[in-house]
Amino acid sequence: MEKALRVIEEMTRLGIIKAYAIGGGIAATYYIEPILTYDLDIFFIPVKEGLDELAPIYDFARKHGYVEEAEAVIIEGFPVQFIPAYNELVREAVSEAITVKYREIEVKLVRAEYLTAIALQTGRAKDRERALRLLESEAVDRDILTRILKRHGLLKRLSKLKGNSHDK
């Protein structure tokens, strides 16, 4: 994964993407115990917004011999799914990403509070489970999370999640 992250950093330096942050299961693993995940989710802000925000990424990948497989690009043997910042919450998550060290490289990572908010917004079963696990961890600052959820109209989803988790 380190080699893939170096390539993603290079894409940022070359202006292929404006900004990025690791999201999804791999980001969650930074905060909570490991989760089964098959690819590296990269939320990104495109340099040019429009219909084909992924085109520059795929062009770069092809020029460097990386292949597409389903929804991912295989970079240095690791499947990477590039996800354009599809709404204001994800855009904010990328903008507010923290810098962490992964082996010998510094990378951008979605904060635990934003991972929780995105999981609540997405609402799939695996996302609700991830949100619960993040909430149970020490990684989430409840005040920051509450402000994020208020800004994006997600407080009721948190209440519903907490209510459902007590039923189990």
Image (cartoon, rainbow, N blue to C red):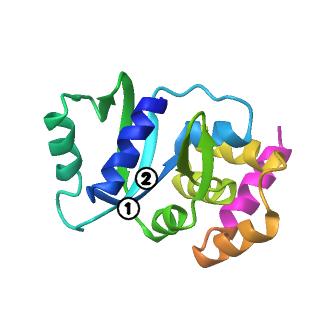
How many other residues sit within 10 Å of disc 2, few (<14), some (14-19) or many (≥20)? Answer: many
- Indicate left or right for 19 with 107 as reference: left
Q: Does the magenta stretch include residue 167?
A: yes
Which residue is identified by label 1? 86
Residue 129 seen by the camera: no
Is 24 rendered above or below residue 3? below
Write the residue at 58% across / 54% down: 110
- Numbered mark located on residue 164 in the image: none
SS state under label 1: loop
Q: Which of marks 2 and 1 is in front?
A: 2
**For residue 34, which quarter of the picture?**
top right
Q: Which amino acid does label 1 sit on?
A: Tyr
The C terminus: image quadrant: top right
- Indicate left or right for 51 with 36 as reference: left
Q: What residue type is labelled 2?
A: Phe
Range of magenta residues: 156-168
Q: Is residue 146 magenta?
A: no
Point out residue 131 in the picture as x, y percentages from the top left corner.
68, 48
- Indicate left or right for 82 with 34 as reference: left
Write the residue at 51% across / 47% down: 22
How many other residues sit within 10 Å of disc 1, few (<14), some (14-19) or many (≥20)? Answer: few
